[in-house]
Image: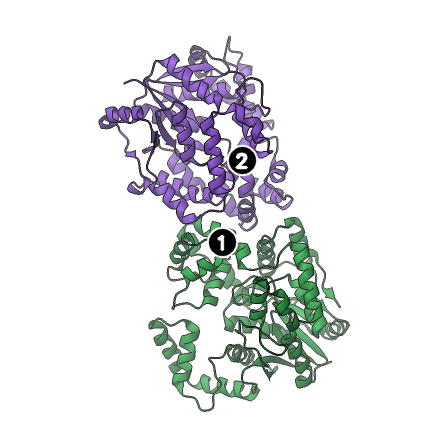
Chain colours: A green, B purple
Amino acid sequence: MKATGVVVEYNPFHNGHYYHLQETKKATGADCIIAVMSGNFLQRGEPALLSKWKRTKMALLGGADLVIELPYAFATSHAPRFAFGSIYLLQSLGAESFCFGSESGDAELFSKTHEWLNDKQETYQEHIRSFMNNGLSYPSAASRAFESLDIPLALDLSKPNNILGFEYVRASRELGSHIRPVTIKRKNADYHDVMLGKGNIASATAIREAIFTNDAEQAAPYMPGYTLELLAQEQVEKGTLMNWERFYPLLRYQLLSTNPSEINRFYEVEEGLEYRMIEAMKKSDSYETFMKHLKTKRYTWTRLQRACLHVLNKVKKDEMLAILDSSPSYIRVLGMTGKGREYLGSVKKSLDLPLVTTVSKYDSAGLRLEAKTSLVYAQGAARDILRAEKEEFNTPPVIV
Amino acid sequence: MKATGVVVEYNPFHNGHYYHLQETKKATGADCIIAVMSGNFLQRGEPALLSKWKRTKMALLGGADLVIELPYAFATSHAPRFAFGSIYLLQSLGAESFCFGSESGDAELFSKTHEWLNDKQETYQEHIRSFMNNGLSYPSAASRAFESLDIPLALDLSKPNNILGFEYVRASRELGSHIRPVTIKRKNADYHDVMLGKGNIASATAIREAIFTNDAEQAAPYMPGYTLELLAQEQVEKGTLMNWERFYPLLRYQLLSTNPSEINRFYEVEEGLEYRMIEAMKKSDSYETFMKHLKTKRYTWTRLQRACLHVLNKVKKDEMLAILDSSPSYIRVLGMTGKGREYLGSVKKSLDLPLVTTVSKYDSAGLRLEAKTSLVYAQGAARDILRAEKEEFNTPPVIV
């Protein structure tokens, strides 16, 4: 059997994701699609709209065959670490290729750009530092530094999906992996689009925006029926879909009752950001106003949200780095189809990492962090905490 | 001018308190009553029903002339430290006497019992340890040990107000103070009574119970009109009166997202209580069910609530002990009448401690702890956090 991999968040699963899965099968000729999916918290520094179990179900119904959890530490890290964790898991599972959406649509260009950039590594890093010293955030500085290298016919690295794709390619090269990069040109919606567009494809950002401004009905045409059903089910079970506002009282409490020196011990809180966070919180009465007060040119919105996430989850620098400094240490199966199970069976014996289906049966620092952050995630909605812990520890993989 | 002191919480101020203030004037012949009052958090390990400013106003309208804040560290400590802080402040302010309600009503008996007990100190302490080794809580063990000494005609130290009174007397003796103890026999209501009684006097416990079970109207006859008005005003301003349930989500978050070893660093969390707290929290969906799961014969309800309070406020052992190991280091005036101001004027020059009227103008570890816990207290209700901090730092004394 031939497997290909995709790296996803499905927050929530929509028609664009469905299209991508269909195209992935065509472009790679794979029998089985492995989706490496983030759990409760996402790369943009946000809680997932709905549980990992329901998002897994969406993935399986939409065309994925095997859903693997990207551990918290990688799922909430900046693009290079996020990409490294994802590609590492796909390689460990024996995927022959991986397939990502990009603005470019030309896989060869990603590899070539990586080679060109490798040759000019020193100059590139120097330029990045110099742009950052002038007050730019890391992504802006990296993009400007890249432009300044004047590479012929290069990838447009100011586009968010090109950046991520580039990081996937870089990770696979650094791993010395034979996994083959494949890319599909994205259709219609840009990653950051906040408006619902024409046709039946819109970005997840625009869909979430519509859901939280009570335009849920307007968002419906952009999602498959099972997504709508699972969203409705989550609403009934938890009384809400999750977003940062649900955690605002907890983040406020945490920031206003903890000494700055202790806040500084949390991952991604650097350069006195703890003081800025406390001051911003004292001026705010919602997460939205808090973020507006916190925002500065030096940091991207995403970077700041991730720092807030680690403060909320009380994830310390040493704790996070201990996990990030090594590669993922287990493969956690969130769900599978019959074909996914068949594929797993075929590679099981040759796996280097332990395969975890029920968390209660396996112990590791990464999974303890998963359990800890799951308990925080559960507190965003009024629900039974005991059930939350049992769910995290004892839920078997979703089977579709 | 001659001043006497009372030690109070006024949670809320009721007819029994009014009666006590009137009797205090008669019994001591004082021109001015100084009330040492706890701030946001109380000795029983609970948040105050309403703000210290409104409770100060009640005190002044009810007959007190000067209201002084008992700092958090003393206000939320066990009886000996609570009494020490209170009597120390009264002595510092030059009060000639202090007057407390008791089941006994015989001041002489308190002094004599103190002398008897002092003579048998070693045996007494030994017996306490032995009863505690048999699983009794400290207060039960102390009461049983006291009985076992078989002191003739002694004070009944199983009664809560006798215990507190006894601690006041002990504190004044230990301070080598000339401050004279006066006691008034309590009328009608017992401290811990949970039922509204006959007549117009009921315990604060019974009144709070009525308020939170929507029998507020039934509680009205037991309180002066200004108490009712100030309670209503607080309801309008904050949308609620404060109780532990309001802090349940924050306590839950704190317990379920913090490592046990760090919880153990908070004051009064001893002997593995941190694990018991976490386990109890995982089984609960309200503060009430949490406390029922937490309760054990070894600790009193009050002792457990105080430990929870320090966890909620993130008050560490070293931080608390640094304040408790010395005496109160300032006198904070929460409010005064004309007569109170006159008294203050008359003693101002001879005071050993700095007089603080507006917190923003004075810095000390005790006041920083006050500000920190005030920010937590403010989060029990939906309100502007900025306003909470300004209120704590900039509110001038209430003048009546």
Residue at 36%, 14% (x, y): give it. B28
Front of the two marks 1 and 2: 1
Judge whether residue B169 can be spotted in this image. yes
Classify B225 as above or below B147: below
Classify B163 as above or below A381: above
**Count of numbered circles on the image:** 2
**B29 and A21: which one is in front?**
B29
Residue at 62%, 65% (x, y): give it. A216
**Label 2: how many Cα within 10 Å (few below 14, some 14–19, many 20+):** many
Furthest-top residue in view? B152
**A19 and A210: which one is in front?**
A210
Q: Mark 1 belongs to which amino acid?
A: Leu
**A190 and A368: which one is in front?**
A190
- Residue A38: where, in percent of width, then height? 60, 67
Classify B13 as above or below A228: above
The disc placed on residue A10 is: none
**Label 1: how many Cα within 10 Å (few below 14, some 14–19, many 20+):** many
Q: Disc 2 marks which residue?
A: B305
The disc placed on residue A251 is: 1
